[in-house]
């Protein structure tokens, strides 16, 4: 006799699906490459941050101690830090290119494509600045620098939006909240930079304090951004915990 109710059957657990459930058991090659791209960005940030810190403290120590031998060591240290910055920039450029493999169903692909385009434009404009300097076209160099900075800023915002959308796809509201905080931090930092520019033109005494706030804010934002990228790449490495 067929009984529809079996009191000895094991209880069935309620299933809960996130948008990432279809690939949670087997990560697609595209998302593996996306994770590698985020890893490149993360270590690029760490390399640039470490190089900048060593460069600043090395300069302070060299100035305090003085002497020819110290100057030679300082020159060597600055060369190493410059190389570290170059490596960090290259990793930060390669990373978003790998993130272009992110699946379209995540809803994040458009953001990373836009980010790569604006960053490439910014890099090309930097080469344009070198040409204007060599040809003594300083007004054009200043204009290209402004456009390059704006293009780089837009690219950075789009990449943060990419991380936010990918975090939402993974069901990681905590990472999406981190991305929102980074976006807020970018807006605040841009506002402070505008205020500092106005203060610079007006030669106001508040310039030093505003400049210090911009530097400290940029450092904090850099660390927040690194934590966001690190958390997201770890989320992609552990999909079964979603």
Image (cartoon, rainbow, N blue to C red):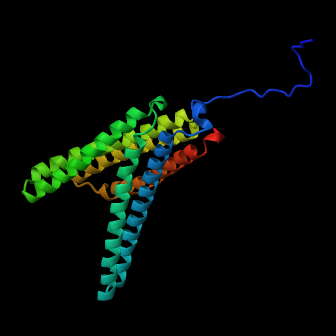
Please state which of residues 106 and 180 is positioned toward the viewer in this rendering: 106
Residue 142 is left or right of residue 73, and the answer is: left
- Residue 173 at x, y percent in the picture: 57, 36
Tell me the quadrant of the picture where the C terminus can be found: top right
- At horizontal 32% and vertical 88% (from top left) the residue drawn is 69
Residue 57 is left or right of residue 178, and the answer is: left
Please state which of residues 53 and 216 is positioned toward the viewer in this rendering: 53
- Residue 181 at x, y percent in the picture: 48, 42
Question: Which of the 4 image quadrants contains residue 20?
Answer: top right
Residue 82 is left or right of residue 105, and the answer is: left
Q: Is residue 219 above or below residue 104?
A: below
Question: Which of the 4 image quadrants contains residue 90?
Answer: bottom left
- Residue 174 at x, y percent in the picture: 57, 40
**Residue that protrudes farthest toward the front in the picture:** 1
- At horizontal 43% and vertical 41% (from top left) the residue drawn is 160
- At horizontal 46% and vertical 45% (from top left) the residue drawn is 33
- At horizontal 25% and vertical 46% (from top left) the residue drawn is 122
Can residue 88 be seen by looking at this rendering?
A: yes
Tell me the quadrant of the picture where the N terminus can be found: top right
Can residue 212 be seen by looking at this rendering?
A: no
Question: Which of the 4 image quadrants contains residue 89?
Answer: bottom left
């Amino acid at each position: 006799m067929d009984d529809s109710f079996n009191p000895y059957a094991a209880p069935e657990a309620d299933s809960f699906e996130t948008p990432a459930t279809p690939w949670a058991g087997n990560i697609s090659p595209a998302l593996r490459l996306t994770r590698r791209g985020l890893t490149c960005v993360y270590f690029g940030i760490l390399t640039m941050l470490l190089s900048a810190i060593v460069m600043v403290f090395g300069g302070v120590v060299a100035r305090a101690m003085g002497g020819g031998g110290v100057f030679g060591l300082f020159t060597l240290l600055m060369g190493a830090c410059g190389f570290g910055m170059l490596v960090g920039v290259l990793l930060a450029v390669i990373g978003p290119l790998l993130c272009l493999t992110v699946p379209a169903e995540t809803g994040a692909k458009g953001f990373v494509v836009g980010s790569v385009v604006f960053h490439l434009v910014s890099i090309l404009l930097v080469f344009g600045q070198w040409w204007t300097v060599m040809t003594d076209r300083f007004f054009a160099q200043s204009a290209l620098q402004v456009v390059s900075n704006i293009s780089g800023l837009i690219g950075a915002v789009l990449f943060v939006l990419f991380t936010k959308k990918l975090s939402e796809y993974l069901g990681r509201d905590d990472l999406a909240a981190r991305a929102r905080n980074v976006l807020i931090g970018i807006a605040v930092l841009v506002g402070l930079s505008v205020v500092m520019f106005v203060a610079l033109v007006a030669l106001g005494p508040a310039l030093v304090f505003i400049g210090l706030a911009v530097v400290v804010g940029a450092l904090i934002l850099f660390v927040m951004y690194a934590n966001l990228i690190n958390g997201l790449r770890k989320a992609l490495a552990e999909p079964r915990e979603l």
